[in-house]
Amino acid sequence: MKAILALLLALYPLGGVAEAAAAAPLPFSSIVPVPVTATPAAGVTYEITAATTIYSEAPGAGDQLAQLLRRSTGYPVAIVTSPPASGISLLLSGAPAGAEAYQLDVTASSIVVRGNSAAGLFNGVQTLRQLLPYAADSQTVQPGPWLVAGGRVVDQPRYAYRGAMLDVARHFFSVDTVRAYIDQIALYKINYLHLHLSDDQGWRIVVDSWPRLATYGGSTAVGGGPGGYYTKADYQAIVAHAAARNVTIVPEIDMPGHTNAALASYAELNCNGVAPPLYTGTDVGFSSLCTAKELTYTFVDQVIGELAAITPGPYLHIGGDEAASTLPADYATFVNRAQQIVAAHGKTVVGWHDVVNATPLPSTVAQYWGTTQRNTAVANAGRKVIMSPASKAYLDMKYNRRTPLGQTWAGTIEVKDAYGWDPGAYLTGLPSGQVLGVEAPLWTETLRTANDLEYMAFPRLPAIAELGWSPYATHNWTAFRGRLGAQSPRWRVMGVDFYPSTQVTWL
């Protein structure tokens, strides 16, 4: 933080630091997640001017960067067909090994981002964004100047899976809100968004073979709100928006529990043939598909089949948690058949860690949501695990007892708590090599607006993102809170609401 203030004072010795901050470059010490290596070049800056052009060997990354700069600088920022001598180049060569790795070089005459894939270039551009003046993220033209600190960053992720989860079932969120959340998480190199599409309170995706799931089961929400659902075109628009930002959508249909919206929509899915009323409360564990009916598996096959057909990513989440009203033997039978159905539709199963109580397929990924560091069944299952311990990673937990939103059943989670754990060594007995990555779930029983989502996600989501991306050897709370504090002016420019934790000195 002192380095950032010193740079501002050096650039603007006559004062006006607060006004100038929006146009000042950020030092390499402000990047979140922290890179593997970041070597500044003292006294070197690159200035973006009206003559700056972009060459990109991955058109999407170049187009997005050009659009960002055109909007805030007012410059033409043309896309050119060969690397410019004094512009910005995004090159598919020369990066460290790994699909998402990148190298960023900033000199007085050029900016060069190198990656082995479009994903690597996208990641490099996100780091470049954090080195641009805050005003670069403005929706309107700003005066500049547009300086970027010089040096080299060489970087690659610790984990292949770095996720966020958004619960659109308890409260429904529009396509535009989901797109905005994707934009926000992508800045911190989150590469998976898990959408919780169904629960007791609402079903949020059209299924042509079972149309009342959306039209009736999606008609309400917690507290009796209006609900809503995504058409297939809506869902595909979200998938496409995410893919352009190196984010893969992981859809979840929770079952056999958390299914009241489906049971209310179709009486025949109930063992007694009687549909329960729609549910707008927040209790869990009371609903279950009728695991003894063959129709149930026809239902699962048709729902999964339609969803898989519009989901290009490799994963499909079957839920499987809190099925208290399903007998253990019936639960195992159901989960085992559901896994086979997902596999038959060409997808890899992800389930909440309860699925290890069935017989998980060798490829099945368990998502650990427990509140303790000990779960022998998960540790000994021999399966890949996504780490989402509720007492560390659940973004809907209150920051403290005075937080107006959120819950406390897994405790309260301040920023230091969200940052202060190691996904690779958290669960006792789980080999570090079985950890696929991390995910930060955001449940929405108490959240109704986009501002609510942002307030609970920021600043904790960047903390989880750093755990997923950065080498654990770089883990340092003091350094992190300084880098985190440097993010707040950009969030203000972007219009992102956030919780101003007293644990962090905000710039």
Image (tube, grey):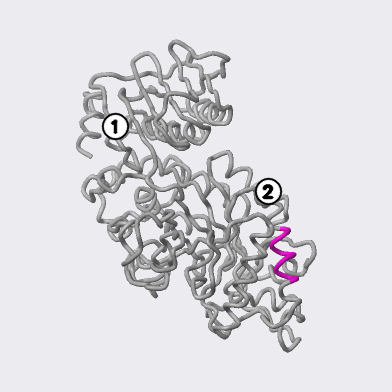
Q: CA distance from mark 2 to mark 1?
A: 37 Å
Is 377 located above or below residue 5 in the figure? Answer: below
Is 471 located above or below residue 262 in the figure? Answer: above
Question: In the image, 421: left or right of 407?
Answer: left
Q: Residues within 10 Å of mark 2 (few under 14, many from 20)?
A: some
The spot of residue 444 in percent (x, y) is 51, 65
Which label is found at residue 38?
Answer: 1
Q: Quadrant of the C terminus?
A: top left
Under circle 1, the secondary element is: strand
For mark 2, what is the residue? 236
For marks 2 and 1, the one nearer the N-term is 1
The spot of residue 11 in percent (x, y) is 26, 23
Question: In the image, 483: left or right of 404?
Answer: left
Magenta residue check for 500: no
Q: Which residues are magenta?
A: 298-306
* Residue at the outermost bottom position: 272
Q: Main secondary structure of the magenta part?
A: helix
Under circle 2, the secondary element is: helix
Q: Quadrant of residue 16?
A: top left
The spot of residue 227 in percent (x, y) is 65, 66
> Residue flagged by tag 2: what amino acid is it?
Gln
> Residue flagged by tag 1: what amino acid is it?
Ala
Which of the two residues, 191 or 12, is positioned nearer the viewer here?
191
